[in-house]
Amino acid sequence: MAVKNTTLIPDDSPIAAVPAALAPPRTLIVDRVSRSDQRAVLAGCSGLEPKITFSNGHVPQSVLCTLWDRDHQLRADAAVALAKLNIYYKQKFGHDLGISSAYRTYSEQAAVRAQRGYMAAPAGTSNHGWALAVDLSNMQNYNAEYWWLRTNAPAFGFDSPDWARPGGTLREPWHWEFVSGVQAVGTDS
């Protein structure tokens, strides 16, 4: 059987800033299926970016992965990136990132909008509905953990949008988004 090299991440990728133990491999060498020491950061989650054949709030279960808290889900690529960020975060702070919200169905978005008014996006427009946004329960203010995330989360693909930052229009330190996914679906809410 031939060995195949598959380049996964270009050498000039910003992922180079991620600690080596948490970063995905740059090249995968495959010659057979193995049950070696390589394990997924989220059991049963591929981490692959899905083809978008669904609408906001109607993300199929087949592209969602359950996060470490077992109560919330994100799109597979966002979920694996957040799980890796969580490992790094836990090494620094000694506890997991707390999650208060992640994927929201269309009807859940409508309920949140009815409850919170202008503080929530209209149903069908939230990045929570694309399974690309997460609200972190331990980020209720712009504390040291928030500033650590602002520095480190982009290396894992997550960032706080301008409107959620200090001086932003809504100032939500708890709201974080998977940037490449948000850009791919063309939203900014």
Image (cartoon, rainbow, N blue to C red):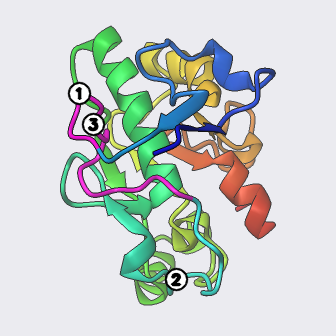
User: Is residue 95 or residue 82 the one in the foreground?
Assistant: 82
Task: Residue 43: say if magenta.
Answer: yes
Q: Are marks 1 and 3 in contact (CB under 8 Å)?
A: yes
From the viewer's perspective, is the residue at label 1 or at label 3 nearer?
Answer: 1
Residue position for label 2? 57
User: Is residue 103 or residue 29 the one in the foreground?
Assistant: 29
Circle 3: is it few (<14), some (14-19), or many (20+) Cα within 10 Å? Answer: few
* Magenta segment boundaries in residue numbering: 34-48
**Residue 39: numbered disc:** 3
Q: Quadrant of the N terminus?
A: top left
User: Is residue 144 or residue 75 the one in the foreground?
Assistant: 75
User: Is residue 75 or residue 6 the one in the foreground?
Assistant: 6
Q: Real-space Cα distance between discs 2 and 1? A: 36 Å
Q: Which of marks 1 and 2 precedes in the sequence?
A: 1
From the viewer's perspective, is the residue at label 2 or at label 1 nearer?
Answer: 1
Q: Are marks 2 and 1 in contact (CB under 8 Å)?
A: no
**Residue 37: numbered disc:** 1
Q: Residue at (51%, 15%) from the top-left corner?
A: 148
Q: What is the chief secondary structure element of the magenta stretch?
A: loop
* Res 66 → quadrant: bottom left
Q: Residue at (37%, 38%) from the top-left corner?
A: 83
Question: What amino acid type is highlighted by mark number 3?
Answer: Arg
Numbered disc 2: secondary structure: loop
Question: Please, is residue 147 above or below residue 63 in the view?
Answer: above
